[in-house]
Image (cartoon, grey):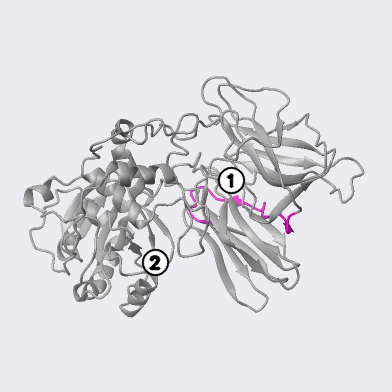
Amino acid sequence: MKVVALALLLPITAAWAQSLQDIPNFSLLDYRGKHHELRRTDGKVAVLFFTGNGCPAARQSVQKLRSIRSKFGSQGVVFWMINSNPQDDRKSIAEEAEEFRVGSVPILKDDFQAVARLLKVQRTCETFAIDTAGMKIFYRGALDELPDALGAFLAGKRVEVASNPVKGCLITYEKVEPVSYATQVVPILQAKCVSCHSPGNIGPWSMSSHKKVKGMSAMIQETILAKQMPPWHADPVHGTFSNDRSLTAEETGTLLAWIDQGAKQGEGLDPLTNSITPSGEWALGKPDFVVSLPDTQKIPATGVLDYRYVDSGFVMPEDAWIRAAVVRPGNRKVVHHVIARIKYPSGAKGAPDEEVFFTSWAPGNTTPEFPRDTGKFIPKGATFNFELHYNTTGKPETDQSELGLYVMKDVPKVVLETRTTETRELNIPPGEGDARSFCVYHFKRDTLIYDLVPHMHLRGSWFKYEALFPDGKRETLLSVPRYDFNWQTEYRLSEPRRVPAGTWMLCSGAHDNSKQNPLNPDATRRVKYGLQSHEEMFMGFMNVAEAASGK
């Protein structure tokens, strides 16, 4: 069996094998679409067994692996099979798993062969045992010797390194040519990274030069392996999105190979120097109208702050259709989110009973314009109310965020609306790692769905949108296997999805209130619904438009 990789495999010497101790964190999806992260496993030990479809040795080892798992699984040992063959997709892995009775052992897909490359795996059936407390490899070798190694480790005894060779299928790695910083690396950074890693933006450091990037190259490697950066959390198996900022397989390979080659600049000028747009500029150019907070908001140095609700002094001078409504945070260090709601003038035709959600901003928003051919209406005399949620930084701060409105020349083809489904019946037990919730929304008319925006707080774990059609069919429109509260991403479908009247949207997901969740404020606390980040929400936002009949 041939397995293609991202770099030429180096020979593994006995001295190198003995010296390999530390392992960086990594994050992979299994063939069912479930997320697994090494640092978040609840086991004392993580066992990695490398496999590949069609390998006789790997197939013959399945029952032996399951037997070892049966013995040690109750003792805090987690077992993962890892498929690093880029020719094997999740569907074919699922078929192989069913045929050879893998059972409940997760098979993780190493899409870019990043983990196999990192560990310099030579053959399938190679097995690793990792002490998750120290992130150290204490055993590497054949599966046959694993029980002795696990038994010794769990008993607190010295683990003897096996000398038996691994009998598996050779893994072939393709040689990668030297990577050019200027022509290959910089374009990736500019497309996927610099918008956040620039002065005044949310990134903690700026990609303003080769020197800066090289100095952080180890961290870049780590965040790529853990799939923390770029921040994009949609499962690629379900749907395509126009604002997808994830790295492709080729981009991932390029960056990791460049780092492995020493992160060299090469000859010529540095394209990153003087190429960064200041964060204070409007992304879409100067707005037609700017709605500002009437006063500078003062944020104390410390504490948990209540939401603030501030009316703007702006009054809309004329009826207008809006093609974009962009919130520009005044101080990104403290602004957690801004929600702008429109207040219709008294007596306006079609005025709702309460303020209407108009637009919002939170870290992760990447779609400043409304979808093509859509717009939102603002009547003459309307005003705005801002919902402001601030974080504290340890010193007093100020903020004066703004809302920019961009007027359409013509009436849009369809009216964009933001709709929401949620449940407030949350009762998450202490220590629960997969507390599940759901909510539903019923479409009474034919509808076009443009954007999907899941929302939970710090304990949010995973979230899924599924369309349940009147004819009984079911379709996953978005799956987020690893939800990250720090990135409130709006997932814009590449093409709007039309759903007929009578369709239900099922939003399902879970909260992780265990100590394995690094964002969890307190794993000993029972959590219920609330506005603050240490409380919880479960909401599915959707940007939609009622579809014209017959279109």
Q: Secondary structure at mark 1?
A: strand
Q: Is residue 513 left or right of residue 212?
A: right
Q: Secondary structure at mark 2?
A: loop
Residue sitting at 68 percent across and 70 percent down?
Answer: 503
522 or 39: nearer the viewer = 39
Q: Is residue 177 left or right of residue 478?
A: left
- Up the image or down, 384 lies above or below 457; here it is above
Q: Is residue 253 magenta?
A: no
The quarter of the picture where residue 463 lies is: bottom right
The quarter of the picture where residue 371 lies is: bottom right
Residue 110 at x, y = what percent?
32, 60
Counting residues from the start of the chain, the first of labels 1 and 2 encountered is 2
For the C terminus, give its image quadrant: bottom right
State the CA–CA distance, disc 1 to disc 2: 31 Å
Q: Is residue 380 left or right of residue 26?
A: right
- Closer to viewer: mark 1 or mark 2: 2
Q: Is residue 490 left or right of residue 551?
A: left
Q: Which mark is residue 527?
A: 1
Q: Is residue 430 magenta?
A: yes
Residue 505 at x, y = what percent?
65, 64
> Can residue 273 be seen in this snapshot?
yes
The magenta segment is 412-435
Tell me which amino acid carries mark 1: Val
The quarter of the picture where residue 205 lies is: top left
Tell me which amino acid carries mark 2: Tyr
Instruction: Give the residue furthest to the top.
Output: 396
228 or 163: nearer the viewer = 228
